Image (spheres, coloured by chain):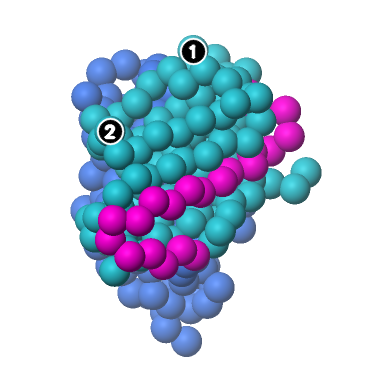
Amino acid sequence: AQSVTQPDIHITVSEGASLELRCNYSYGATPYLFWYVQSPGQGLQLLLKYFSGDTLVQGIKGFEAEFKRSQSSFNLRKPSVHWSDAAEYFCAVGSSNYKLTFGKGTLLTVNP
Amino acid sequence: DTGVSQDPRHKITKRGQNVTFRCDPISEHNRLYWYRQTLGQGPEFLTYFQNEAQLEKSRLLSDRFSAERPKGSFSTLEIQRTEQGDSAMYLCASSTGAGRQGIDTQYFGPGTRLTVL
């Protein structure tokens, strides 16, 4: 069965600093990987996805993620964080039975 | 494109009552999914529809839960005899169904927050 681990429950960064959120997955076949962001009390918004091809994926709001098969990782990065990026971030893996399996999320706090 | 909508956004009920939630997917999306999210956790898959057919149900979906998508458009999720443990955010998502090997991008609605007293 597939699983996703987000090792960091809570990260605090200063506005303008760089950001990297970690995601490790376990899946027996070619993974389909996603990052979603959730603001308080809201649904999930898709940031980016990896299905195949270039392992460096660009998303919305200046985010990117890199798929590393050898490390079973799909870390999310942003070069300069804005206060509006404060939210909870979820990594997910999709499987051939259509469902998404999510990690427990990383809460991002941005200090002014 | 109006996105996935869910109604109501919030529901407070007493233990033992029945509740029903509605999800309207993005127009022409063939697939519809329900997830449950409890505090401090990521969403967990509950069930999935391809058009009007319910193709998979998680073991999380006890016999008190039932979901329908009668005409392949909107869906309802009903919880009978609610328990305090049912308190959670219920998220609906939809996708086109055009993805390779069954995988495509799921777009989520704002969720229904259920509180069982």
Crowding near pointer 1: few (<14 within 10 Å), some, many (20+)? few
For mark 2, name the chain: B
Q: Quadrant of residue A71?
A: top left
Which chain is tinted blue?
A
Q: Nearer the viewer, residue A112 or B2?
A: B2
Magenta span: B10-30
**Location of residue B73 in the rendering, given as x and y in whole percent from the top left corner:** 66, 30
Q: Does the magenta stretch include residue A41?
A: no
Q: Is residue B27 magenta?
A: yes
Which chain is tinted cyan?
B
**Location of residue A1 in the rendering, given as x and y in whole percent from the top left corner:** 22, 24
Q: Can residue A48 be seen in this view?
A: no
The image shows residue A29, relative to residue A104, as above or below, that is above
Residue at image mark 2: B63
- Callout 2 amino acid: Asp
Residue at image mark 1: B101
Q: Which of A96 and A34 is in front in this view?
A: A96
Q: Is residue A98 visible?
A: yes
Q: What element carries label 1?
A: helix
Q: In which quarter of the image is residue B94?
A: top right
**In front: label 2 or label 1:** 2
Residue drawn 39% across the image and 75% down it? A109
Residue drawn 26% across the image and 35% down it? B62
